[in-house]
Image (cartoon, grey):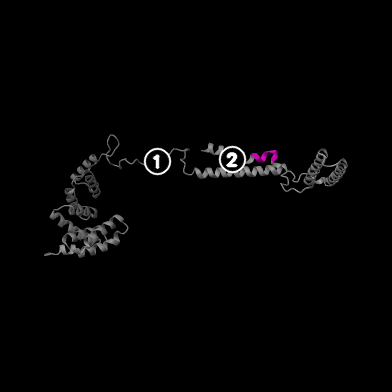
Amino acid sequence: MSVIAFVLCAAAVAVAVGPLMRRRANLPLGAGLEDDSPVRRWQEEKDRLTGQLRDNDLALAEGRIDPARHSATATRLAGEAEHALARLREVRGALAPAYAASPASERRWTVALVAGCVVAATYGVHAVASRGDIDMTRSPHGDMAASPRPDDAPAGMPVGADGVPDIGAMVARLEARIESGDYAPDDVAMLLRSYRVLGRDGDRLLDEAAGKFPDDVQIRLAFIDAALTGTDADRLARAETMVSELMAASPDLAEARWYRALFLVRHGDLDAARAELRALAPLVAGNPQAADAVRTLLSRIDIPQHDRAAQPGK
């Protein structure tokens, strides 16, 4: 790109400065077509007298005038020519050039100024045009040397022979840890995520974890969510109790209010469910996905026929 810019710059300078460097560029421009200088008037007078002398000779040759008249006319025209030549000699100063040539130093400054403007404009266009170009002076991978690859395994996760995280080995290791009884809530959360990836059921794990960590909020929420997706009455009753306990401990916990609204809908108490959802809406306003779920459920139960269907005997 720099070579192209240099060539274009050189061509532009040559085109702009070339005419200024020629000698003819500093010659006088003259007076134009409407010149009334003494020299121009003498040229016109000379042309007129020459034409009349030629006509006088032609008339004598054709016999239209006699020799006496031809001689008189020639004498008169010669006198007029002498008079015009005398006037021309009196104004010899008009023969000097109308415009003095520019000094050499002035020409050099003009050329330098034009060349500088062309160079500045060319490099300005080059800078604007190359803003989106790829920087070829450094490796694009230099800034990525310290960043991990997308398929790099997290710290502590087993990897296969090809370097890809081995989820099966990680699940086996977590299951062994949980069976030994020496595990933490984070181990339960990680194993549950792995079960979801593998499509396996984690109800038994949640039952054990809820008994081992009865005060852990995340395990409680995971248990409630799993219970609502199933049909086990005992698990549903236990989950509803957990919701009530979470609401008592943290009234502004958005997840607890959401699950409470779901249980109210299951019981057919739509008025209470609407009130719960309307109270939940401001709490999840900053979460577009949660806010959309609240609006969707509220619109579904905010229809009169739902109330009639929920009332017994109708």
Highlighted range, magenta? 18-24
Q: Quadrant of the C terminus?
A: bottom left
* SS at circle 1: helix
All told, the count of numbered labels is 2
- Of 99 and 230, nearer the camera is 99
State which quadrant residue 177 falls in: top left
- Magenta residue check for 22: yes
Q: Nearer the viewer, residue 93 or 100?
A: 93
Q: Is residue 90 left or right of residue 13?
A: right
User: Tag 2, which secondary structure?
Assistant: helix
- Magenta region, main secondary structure: helix
Which amino acid, by three-letter code, is at mark 1? Met
The location of residue 190, given as percent across then percent down, is 25, 46
- Does residue 183 appear left or right of residue 35 in this picture? left
Query: Which residue is situated farthest in the top direction here?
Result: 161
Amino acid type for the residue under numbered disc 2:
Ala
Residue extending farthest to the left is 313
The reply to whether discs 2 and 1 touch (Cβ–Cβ < 8 Å) is no
Residue that mark 1 sits on = 144
Residue at 86 percent across and 45 percent down: it is: 76
x%, y% of residue 121?
57, 45
The mark found on residue 12 in the picture is 2
Comparing labels 2 and 1, the label whose residue is closer to the camera: 2
Residue 256 colored magenta? no
